[in-house]
Image: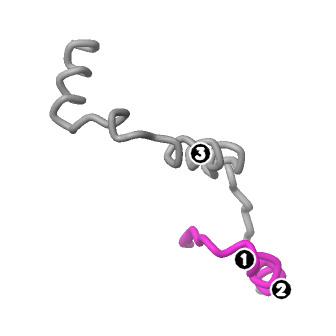
């Protein structure tokens, strides 16, 4: 038996699930443990919207900072 993970748009969810509930030998596991909560998505978008150029650093500087902190 094989397992398949499918990501579908919210507006198609009910149609998709209702179809497969009638298919023999299909098990539906509505696993959403890895889904990012809406409030967290909104928080990140707000931070991006309010960020200024001086809030960003280049990747090389970031790596140096992390090396100092963790090595």
Task: Please tell me which residue is depicted at 67% across the width and 75% down the height of the picture.
Answer: 9
Distance between mark 1 and mark 2 Cα atoms? 8 Å
| Location of residue 25 (image quadrant) | bottom right
Q: Nearer the viewer, residue 68 or 9?
A: 68
Q: Residues within 10 Å of mark 1 (few under 14, many from 20)?
A: few
Percent of width and height locating residue 56: 32, 37
- As helix, strand or loop, the secondary structure at mark 1 comes to loop
Task: Please tell me which residue is depicted at 57% across the width and 49% down the height of the picture.
Answer: 45
Q: Nearer the viewer, mark 3 or mark 1?
A: 3
Residue designated by label 2: 22
Residue designated by label 3: 46
Magenta range is 1-21
- Quarter holding the C terminus? top left
Q: Is residue 16 magenta?
A: yes
Percent of width and height locating residue 53: 34, 41
Task: Please tell me which residue is depicted at 83% across the width and 85% down the height of the picture.
Answer: 22
| Location of residue 40 (image quadrant) | top right
Q: Residues within 10 Å of mark 2 (few under 14, many from 20)?
A: few
- As helix, strand or loop, the secondary structure at mark 2 comes to loop
Residue designated by label 1: 26
Percent of width and height locating residue 48: 49, 46
Q: Earlier in the sequence, mark 2 or mark 3?
A: 2
Q: Earlier in the sequence, mark 3 or mark 1?
A: 1
Q: Is residue 39 left or right of residue 66?
A: right
Q: Nearer the viewer, residue 16 or 59?
A: 59
Distance between mark 2 and mark 3 Cα atoms? 42 Å
- As helix, strand or loop, the secondary structure at mark 3 comes to helix
Q: Is residue 57 above or below residue 12?
A: above
Q: Is residue 27 magenta?
A: no
Percent of width and height locating residue 3: 56, 68
Q: Nearer the viewer, mark 2 or mark 3?
A: 3
Q: Residues within 10 Å of mark 3 (few under 14, many from 20)?
A: few
């Amino acid at each position: 038996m094989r397992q398949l993970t499918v990501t579908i748009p919210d507006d198609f969810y009910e149609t998709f699930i209702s179809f497969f509930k009638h298919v023999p030998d299909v098990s539906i596991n509505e696993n959403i443990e890895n889904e990012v909560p809406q409030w967290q998505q909104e928080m990140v978008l707000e931070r991006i919207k309010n960020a200024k150029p001086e809030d960003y650093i280049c990747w090389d500087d970031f790596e140096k900072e992390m090396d100092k902190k963790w090595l």
